[in-house]
Image: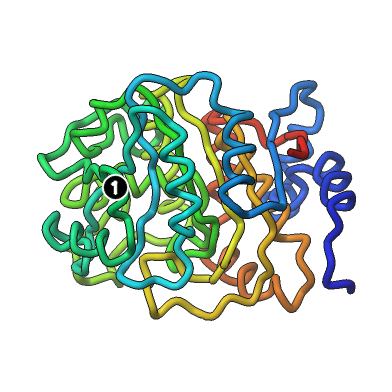
Amino acid sequence: MSRHISRRTFLEVGVATAGAVAAAELGGFGRAAAAEPVKARVYFTEDISPAGLLKVYQKISGEIGGKVAIKLHTGEPNGPNILPRDMVKALQQSIPNSALVETNTLYKGARYTTEDHRKTLKTNGWDFCPVDIMDEDGAVMIPVKGGRHFTEMSVGKHMLNYDAMVVLTHFKGHAMGGFGGSMKNIAIGCADGPIGKKMVHAAPDHEDYSKWLMGELFMENMVESAKATVDHFGRRIVFINVLRNMSVDCDCAGVAAAPVKARNLGILASTDLLAVDQASIDMVYRLPEAELHDLKERIESRKGLRQLSYMKALRMGNDRYRIVQV
């Protein structure tokens, strides 16, 4: 198989078979969605640079205003795969009255306390603008509408200070979630460390990871946590996935992250959460086997595709999408 995925091939296949990967893996929900006349728009550029990021953001920024939170996974110290600072800086400086936002971790590490978290932010170069650790002053419960597992979710209290949110995500694999896209970025990243993350992980404590929830139920918990944030912001939340340095491990693995085998693919952006994560998965699944194997194994062994089907079930977006080249 050729190692090159042409722009034309991706655009043609993306329009024709959007959702096909998840349909095959998840019992065909994508086939039912094929009858839907409306497709979400997902903007795409191969240009992984500050200019490319700004171009796709401009296509989805119409409802973004007021005080803006840019939700970024800032990573453990010296993580090799976190998003380039110049890209993030360019985006943040283009959005008036914006700040990067994060929350402390549930696991003990370099972002477990606010004091240590701020040291890590400086180490990783996130000191060019305000960074709001949203649970620094505690947490607040917000509603989960229509969930099976939760009626409310605990998020960092400072999240209520923002009028809009831009979810800027390094798309990659994940040890527990299978993959980390925009949904996971807000599901775990907006939940506060002591309460919300513990709820999502169903964790009896913060140290014995073997007792943390795994599999489809964990995916469903994440989706419901994300739904609380999406419903809170309504139309004033947008999603950007950067498909770059896609290790099977999250940026929370830091320098221990597994080597990257997949090529960089580009940037996808949408106002539709399900569409942007579905398009990201579809694009990754079209990689040659040598590049795809480890990521696919990580995603499917953790039942990660349940993220997509459960978002569909909770009507958190459209798995049918149309790629718009930027």
Assign the C terminus to one quadrant of the image: top right
Looking at the image, which is closer to me, 306 or 77? 77
Looking at the image, which is closer to me, 201 or 48? 48
- Residue 11 location (% of width, % of height): 83, 45
Q: 55 above or below 209?
A: above
Q: Residue at x 79, y 21 (%)?
A: 37
Assign the N terminus to one quadrant of the image: bottom right
Q: Is residue 313 left or right of residue 203?
A: right
**Callout 1: helix, strand or loop?**
strand
Q: Is residue 196 left or right of residue 91?
A: left
Which of the 4 quarters of the picture holds residue 311?
top right
| Mark 1 crowd level (few <14, some 14–19, many ≥20, 10 Å Cα) | many
Q: Residue at x 52, y 62 (%)?
A: 178
Q: Is residue 125 left or right of residue 132?
A: right
Q: Looking at the image, how many numbered discs can be counted on the residues?
A: 1
Q: Is residue 12 left or right of residue 100?
A: right
Q: Residue at x 25, y 61 (%)?
A: 122
**What kind of residue is marked 1?**
Glu
Q: 290 above or below 207?
A: below
Task: Give the residue pinned by disc 1.
Answer: 102
- Residue 72 location (% of width, % of height): 39, 48
Q: Residue at x 25, y 48 (%)?
A: 103
- Residue 52 location (% of width, % of height): 64, 46
- Residue 48 location (% of width, % of height): 63, 54
